[in-house]
Image (cartoon, rainbow, N blue to C red):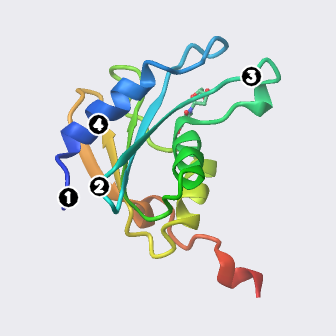
Amino acid sequence: MDIPMDPAALMALAEHARGFAHAPYSRFQVGAALLCDDGSVVGGCNVENASYGATICAERVAVGAAVASGRRRFVAVAVAGPAGVALGPCGICRQVLSEFSPDGALRVVTRDAAGAPRVTTLGALLPAAFGPADLR
Ligand code: THU
């Protein structure tokens, strides 16, 4: 699936962000790299909390950082978990990403258990998403 950046390169940036993870409780470090439509990439990592429910996933940290720096149009997101884990965004992160990709066109780059990048769409991961139209 086409994205205007080598999926492996975007995944490498997610892996870099993973190095900043604050995950002392789960020890499950996750990184995300969000490719914006201006070509910039915003990183995120999971930020855990002693009050476990206050934990924020890497993808949502990346979305928050991007929005807080004036970027809301996203092309792709790569998610890197521990080696050997085929990790996809959790349900809450899919919903948060959907807020900024209502048509589901956002590309989601994951890696399989062997580490090879795989590209899918948010729409495939979250069909029939709840969105603003449902509020009316
Ligand atoms: N986590 C993420 O950062 N992204 C995901 O998509 C899945 C889960 C984090 C949350 C928590 O810090 C740890 O992984 C274990 O659930």
Q: Position of residue 10 (x, y in %)?
A: 27, 41
Q: Which badge, 1 or 2, is on the more N-terminal residue? A: 1
Q: Tag 3, which secondary structure? A: loop
Q: Which badge, 2 or 3, is on the more N-terminal residue? A: 2
The residue beneath circle 2 is: 39
Front-most of residues 36 and 105: 36
**Can you tell me whether the CB of the residue at mark 3 lies under 8 Å from the nearest atom of ligand 1?**
no
Q: Which badge, 1 or 4, is on the more N-terminal residue? A: 1
Q: Which badge, 3 or 4, is on the more N-terminal residue? A: 4
Under mark 4, the amino acid is: Met
- The label nearer to you, 1 versus 3, is 1
Front-most of residues 25 and 75: 75
Residue pictured at 27% horizontal, 52% vertical: 119
The image quarter containing residue 32 is: top left
The residue beneath circle 4 is: 11
Labels 1 & 2 near each other (Cβ < 8 A): yes
Q: In this view, does 70 lie above or below 20?
A: below
6 horizontally vs 87: left or right: left
The N terminus sits in image quarter: bottom left
Q: Quadrant of ligand 1?
A: top right
The residue beneath circle 1 is: 4
